[in-house]
Image (spheres, helix red, strand yellow):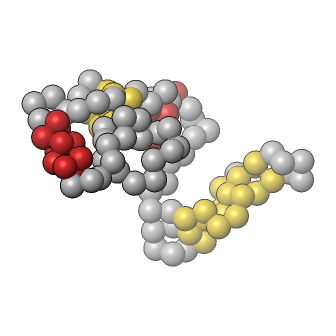
């Protein structure tokens, strides 16, 4: 699960920025995720855990890599085909490695 923190950064006076935007007629959005505001300024959620930026990799992949012998991470690879059993179950992938060579893994 990715941890989110809401609101302004500590030590930053975002109120000045929001007031300056309001003075210019730019709308201030209380919740940028409400789907209503297409334009404006406001606070956004940040993906942080213990003060460090968190990504999908650090939240979901990195914790299980040491315990999953069937999970291999390839950097600088581009998947070009997912191999399936015909019933929608993935069996492997065909990908281009960092050198542009086609590789297949099952």
Q: Position of residue 60 (x, y in %)?
A: 49, 33
Tell me if I can see residue 106 in this picture.
yes
Q: Report whether 84 appears left or right of 33.
A: right
Q: Looking at the image, which residue sits at the far top? A: 50
Residue under the image location 20 percent in, 33 percent down: 9
Q: Report whether 92 appears left or right of 13.
A: right
Q: Position of residue 47 (x, y in %)?
A: 36, 35
14 or 88: nearer the viewer: 14
Residue 33 vs 86, above or below: the answer is above
Quarter residue 81 falls in: bottom right
54 or 13: nearer the viewer: 13
Quarter residue 32 falls in: top left
How many numbered discs, if any? 0
Residue 25 vs 78, above or below: the answer is above
Residue under the image location 65 percent in, 67 percent down: 80
Q: Position of residue 88 (x, y in %)?
A: 84, 48
């Amino acid at each position: 699960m990715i941890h989110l923190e809401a609101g302004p950064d500590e030590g930053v006076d975002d109120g000045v920025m929001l007031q300056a935007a309001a003075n210019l007629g730019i709308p201030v959005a209380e919740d940028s995720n409400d789907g209503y505001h297409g334009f404006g300024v406001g606070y956004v959620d940040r993906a942080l855990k213990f003060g460090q930026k968190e990504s999908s990799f650090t939240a979901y992949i990195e914790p299980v890599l040491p315990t999953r012998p069937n999970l291999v991470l390839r950097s600088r690879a581009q998947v070009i085909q997912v191999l399936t059993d015909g019933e929608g179950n993935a069996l492997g992938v065909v990908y281009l490695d960092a050198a542009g060579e086609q590789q297949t893994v099952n």
